Structures are given as C-alpha cells and as structure tokens.
Image (spheres, rainbow, N blue to C red):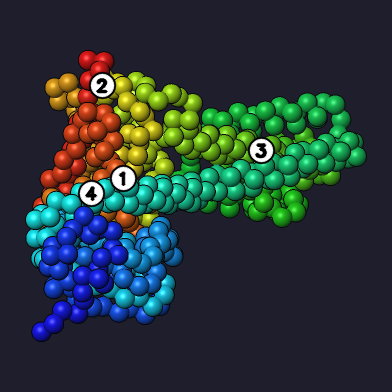
Amino acid sequence: MPSAFTVADLRPVDLFDELSDAELQRWADVAEPVDVGAGRVVVDHAGEATGLWLLLDGVVRAELAGPSSNETIERQHAPTWLGAIAVLTRGGLGVRVVAETDTRFALIPAEHFRRFVFEQPPVTERVMEVAAPVIQRVAEVSQHRDRLASLGTMAAGLTHELNNPAAAARRSAAQLAEALETVNTSFRAFVESGVEREDAARLLALHAEAMDSKRACTVLDALDLADAEDALQDRLEDLGVPEPWAPAEPLARANLSADWLDRLADAAGPAATPAAVRWVAASLGAISLASELEETTTRMSELIAAVKSYAYLDRGTRNEVDVHEGLETTLTVLGHKLKHTTIALVRDYDRTLPRVVVNGGELNQVWTNLLDNAIDALDGSGTLTIRTRPDGGCVLVEIADTGPGIPAGVADRIFDPFFTTKDVGRGTGLGLATARQIVVDRHGGSLTVDSSPDGTTFHVWIPVRPAEAA
C-alpha cells in the first residue's frame, strides 16, 4: 500500500532539516493523515500522547484550562510540529490544541517517533532545542495563573472574614451613637422635670452602682437572664416606663434588682423616672457596645497582620523565621475553607524549635499548597494534623490528613509538573511541583509523601541554616 505522504510533503517541517531523503522517507512511510476542521479540538488537556503531530497546513492554538475559560498561550502556523515531549515522557500534552483554520496533519505514531528520535540524533537535538523554551513558557503562564487564582481565593476568603467584624463594628457604632443621644436627652428631661441637686446626686450614685455591677457581674445563664428580665419588665410597667422590654434586658444583664429600680424611681420622681431608666440602660448598653467595637476591630487588625505576615510585605528576601508563625498565618488565610466543615484541626507543635533562615513568603506558598490539598482531600470531614519536630540539622513539618489517600500509581508522579488529579480548571499540576522546587532547589531541604487508604502525610525538611551559611 503506497504511503499517504512523500518526502516532499514532510520536508518543509524544520524538525527534518538535517535528515537525508532516505532518512525522511522512513517518517513518510509511517505517517497517518489527519484533517481537523476550524474550531475543532485536535488534542484535549487530558488527551493521551498518541504521536507526533506534523502540522502541514493551517493554524492551531495551544490553550491552558482555566476555571471559567481557557487561556491561549501560543499559536503555531504550518509547517511545524507539536507533541514531541509528551510522547517521549509518555505523559499528557498539558495543553489543549484547537484548530483555528482547517488543518492538515501527518501523525507519526508514538512507537515510531520514539524509535526514530533516538536513531537520528539531529531530530533529538532539534526537539530539545525547541521544547525547552516552550515548556518554560507554559510553566510561567500556569504558575502566574495559579498565583492569581490563589490570590483570588485568598482575597475572597479574607473579604468574608473581614466583612463580619466590619459589619459588626458598623452596627455597634450606630447603636453607640443612639445610646449617647439617649444620654443627652435624659439630662434635658431631668432639668425639665425639676430634679433637685440632692436627688441628682443620688441618681449619679445609682448610675455608678449600675456601672460597677455591670463590670463585676458574671454571665447569667439563659434561664436566669430570662427570669430577671421578666421581673424587671413587670416592675418597669408598674412605674409607668414606656416600652419596658427595651431597658429590661440591659438592666438584667447588669444584674440589677427590683430594689435598685425602686431606689432609682424614688430619686428621680414619677416625672423623670422613664428618663432615668433610659439613661442608665443606654449607659450600660454603651459599655457593651464599646467592648464589641474593641473585639471586632481587634479581629480586623489580626487578619490584616496575618496577611502582612503571610506575604512578608515588610521583610527582605531571607530572614530568620518561626515555622509556626508561617503555619498559623497560612491557616488564618485559609480559614474560610475550614468554616462550615467538621474538620478537626490538630496542632502538635514543638515550640522549642529554632528559627530557620528562609524566604518566608516562598515557604508560606509551600504551606498553602500542602494545607489546601489536605483540606480538599478531607472533603468537609476528618482530621487535619500539623506536626513539627527537630530532625538532625533540619526542622521537620508534617501535614497529615485522614482523607482517602493518593490513588495507586499516582504517588510517584504528584510532584511532576503539570500532573494533577483535580478536574480540568481546578488545577494545573504546578502546586506540588512548585512546593518541591521551593523546598529542595531553593532551600536545600526535602519533600516526601506517604499515603494509604487511611490518609496522606507530607514530610517537609527545612535546614535551620542554608548550606552556604552552615
């Protein structure tokens, strides 16, 4: 059966520039014709590397999968070739190839390509020469997009975390303004009702007594508080105080009695009693609101400090770092992923560990990748354990989850660039590859994993001092 292609058909492809006609004829003899229409997918992201694609006519584009759309990283015009590295490594192409125009390919089956490329050194050299910058470009785009995705996830989580205390602070501030206005109007009511100097002094003393009781009282349980509110509300009704349920709650929380209320009414007189009650209740409320404002703004400051520490915004490239600080700030940043789950978080820290000289921002990327993967593996329930201990001249950090474990045959590849077990659009397979590069290549440490159906544990060894400083 005659070949579908001639040497003249394949000669324009620069992969064959150094081959003789006789050598190229071997390629033409095994080449299979493939025509792909405009807009059709040539190879999908997870597509198997079936062979070397020789683009003889047309234009194709290479895309990386994204959460909502695909990102074009390169366009290739005929005559050219693609898929060589995927065939040689027996992995996936890592990108999706789409025909932008009607295209014509000559497909060299994988088994023939692998044989030819090692039998013909000029082809090997050309593959290596062209593939290196392409791989680097794909990695750069993927890492950049993963960083942006991580920042987006972190920003969304922090926005949620900050929104709660911010909303509480706004609410408390508005209520505090109302309380202060009530205090002001109460003083006017005292003047207008003709409260005498001696009675005013008694009112101030009763006010101070109420404030002291508020500061000293313990939290009442729900049943006791409800009973106290009912008793005070009944007495307030007897005294003719409008809307008695409103002041009853803060008075009860301050552990004030009906006897105290009677003394207040005696000092204020019938005309000023409602104003006196509102005055004391508003003052008690202001104390609680001020405390709430302090708590919420403190929480906001803690979150901002966590982000600053996480990103090491105010520090140089390498610093002495407490690994526990990095782990805790990373947990804060990822806190939104733990909310509304039943995941138990166990900290087994050796607080006597020495500080390590590292790039803190890079190390936090490692914790983020490992903790994020562990949380995803638990799928809302289980146990996440973080252990630290010394090991020789290193600090050892172990991040363990009780998830289903890494599938058989996958553990050996999880640190490979572009390898991922996540759905298309959820990951590019660079998270663990980047973590290993940071730990091993940049800090001279080690990163390994143990996994079984009962769970997975990542082991990270970080030298206390970098090799050049040892």
Q: CA distance from mark 3 to mark 2?
A: 54 Å
Q: Amino acid at mark 3?
A: Ala
Looking at the image, which residue is at 21% across and 74% down?
6
Q: CA distance from mark 1 to mark 2?
A: 22 Å
Measured as percent of width and height from the top left, residue 454 is found at 12, 53
- Determine the secondary structure under disc 1: helix
* Residue ID for mark 3: 286
Looking at the image, tell me whether mark 2 or mark 4 is earlier in sequence order.
4
Measured as percent of width and height from the top left, residue 266 is found at 76, 37
**Residue furthest bottom in the image:** 1
Looking at the image, tell me whether mark 1 or mark 2 is earlier in sequence order.
1
Residue 128: which numbered mark, if any? 4
Q: Amino acid at mark 4?
A: Met
Looking at the image, tell me whether mark 1 or mark 4 is earlier in sequence order.
4
Q: Is residue 193 among the parts visible in the rendering?
A: yes
Looking at the image, which residue is at 34% across and 59% down?
426
Q: Are marks 1 and 3 in contact (CB under 8 Å)?
A: no
Disc 3 residue crowd, few under 14, some 14–19, many 20+, Cα 10 Å: many
Q: CA distance from mark 2 to mark 4?
A: 33 Å
Q: Amino acid at mark 1?
A: Asn
* Residue ID for mark 1: 369
* Residue ID for mark 2: 466
Looking at the image, which residue is at 39% across and 65% down?
77
Looking at the image, which residue is at 42% across and 35% down?
310
Looking at the image, tell me whether mark 4 or mark 3 is earlier in sequence order.
4
Q: Amino acid at mark 2?
A: Pro
Q: Is residue 328 among the parts visible in the rendering?
A: no
Disc 1 residue crowd, few under 14, some 14–19, many 20+, Cα 10 Å: some
Q: Nearer the viewer, residue 389 or 226?
A: 389
Measured as percent of width and height from the top left, residue 414 is found at 20, 51
Quadrant into which the C terminus falls: top left
**Rendered position, 337 above or below 6:** above
